[in-house]
Image (tube, rainbow, N blue to C red):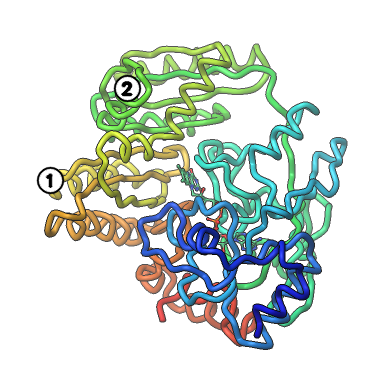
Amino acid sequence: MYKQQLIEKLGKENVSQSESERYRHSHDESPHEAVEPDVVCFPTSREDVEVILEIARTYNIPVTPFGTGSGLEGQAIPVQKGISINFENMNAIIDFSPEDMTITVQPGVTRMQLNKYTNRHGLMFPIDPGADASIGGMVATNASGTTAVRYGAMKDQLLDVEVVLADGRVIHTGTHAKKSSSGYHLTSLFAGSEGTLGIITEITLKLHGIPEKTIMARCTFDSTENCAIAAQTLLLSGIPMMRMELMDAASIAEVNLQNGYDFPIKHSLFLEFAGTEGAVTEEVALAEELLNDLGCENWTVADNPTEQKEIWKARHDLSLSFVHTSGLDEVGADVCVPISRLPELITYARQLIGESGLKGGIWGHIGDGNFHTIVMFNSKMEGEREKAEYTNEALAKRAIEVGGTCTGEHGVGLGKRKYQEQEHGVALDVMKSIKQLFDPQGILNPGKIFLP
Ligand SMILES: Cc1cc2nc3c(=O)[nH]c(=O)nc-3n(C[C@H](O)[C@H](O)[C@H](O)COP(=O)(O)OP(=O)(O)OC[C@H]3O[C@@H](n4cnc5c(N)ncnc54)[C@H](O)[C@@H]3O)c2cc1C
């Protein structure tokens, strides 16, 4: 009945029950179990989204938004089936104001599409999760990436989001002003809400000027702890780093294997400096001097933009490299801790991977205190999955104990629900009350963030 109404209101070309579309919307990039929706809708406007929610409300049908399905915690999996909403037909640039350095887009615009559009005006959108994710999905997971050390996460780029609420109201959470102290900060509430509070139909973002000059530098240390100490030293020095990434020796070996590089197979920092030519040259020299004092080796600079782009691509594809070279399944952690606790957490992560007896690596956005582990396992070998999952669990709990979070950027979805109580305590009850207020019927992406 409700499917017929969806077809009548949205047009049959925008509603699919085909096996291939239901399969495409049953999973994301996480190892969580796939669940097919009953029907997939492709809205072309906010009004279409309003119609979908009205029908969902009337028939009490779960609704799960789907961006590009690149999520790593099962957020887009419709665990209670129902309607999956795909935003690929809502991918228009609505308003671009280069003089204000802002842009308003529909949620299906991807980050690469956005940069292609803005780069020719000397502007960029810096948030770069490894995948070419949708802006809607990136807001909903509060995504970040290698440039967070300078620009922060998605929540820091948002001026306004338009949201269709479960009860049918349409709200704007902000304005086009660069800052505001007016009322509760609803914009931030929707950053990281994973489709559980409302459906985002329009986003106004801050843009940034493209720096005149970029230089990349690589160097190695004899321990991952020393990499963390080096990162801390650079931050304290006040050098405005653009990127600051750790890759342990095991990860460097994967990058070499997958991309044909011969980087020294040692614990490494990949750094990027960006600004005016003169400033960047001075910053690179100062960084080299500071890191030499800490025992850094193999300091190598890449000045050429093409070479830099290739190296960063190899870094972005790192987790896929582990999967491709081993042919195994993976679990990955995404903890984030105060930078002073980073050395001990990385040591603990290495110890856990060693004790598991499984292949694994450590890398991450070390400048934010955010790092990832990957542990490869053979699902056909008894006990391997459990061992791999134990490393994740122990690391997440330790991160929370030292004042950090179980997820710096990938989000809660299904996999990190079990840590929410430890991390948030009584605040978790407040979050549940907020969910109840926004979605009393429980139809918006049910099963995510909170354990049943
Ligand atoms: C190789 C690789 C590397 C990655 N690296 C990073 C990284 O460095 N940093 C990082 O943060 N992430 C990273 N990710 C994870 C992923 O890219 C991000 O979580 C991304 O933000 C997901 O966007 P998406 O469009 O694919 O959303 P999806 O995965 O499709 O959905 C994610 C969530 O957003 C919700 N959603 C989507 N659209 C809307 C909407 N319009 N309204 C309301 N809710 C909506 C969905 O319901 C779901 O809860 C990586 C993923 C891969 C595969």
> Circle 2 — which element?
helix
* For marks 2 and 1 on the same chain, the one whose residue lies earlier in the sequence: 2
Numbered mark located on residue 284 in the image: none
Nearer to me, 429 or 124 = 124
Left or right of residue 363, residue 394 in this image: left
In this rendering, the answer to whether 382 lies above or below 220 is below
> Circle 1 — which element?
loop
Residue located beneath label 2 in the image = 256
Residue 29 percent location from the top left of the image:
43, 52
Q: Is residue 1 visible in the rendered structure shown here?
A: yes
Q: Are marks 2 and 1 in contact (CB under 8 Å)?
A: no
* Mark 1 Cα-neighbour bin, 10 Å: few <14, some 14–19, many ≥20: few
Q: Is mark 1 within 8 Å of ligand 1?
A: no
Residue located beneath label 1 in the image = 357
Badge 1 amino acid: Gly
Locate residue 253: give its quadrant: top left
Badge 2 amino acid: Asn
Q: Is residue 75 visible in the rendered structure shown here?
A: no
Q: Quadrant of the N terminus?
A: bottom right
Residue 100 percent location from the top left of the image:
85, 40
Disc tally is: 2
User: Residue shown at 37%/29% (left/top)?
Assistant: 230
Left or right of residue 252, residue 61 in this image: right
Locate residue 270: give its quadrant: top left
Mark pair 2, 1: CA separation: 23 Å
User: Residue shown at 53%/22% (left/top)?
Assistant: 309
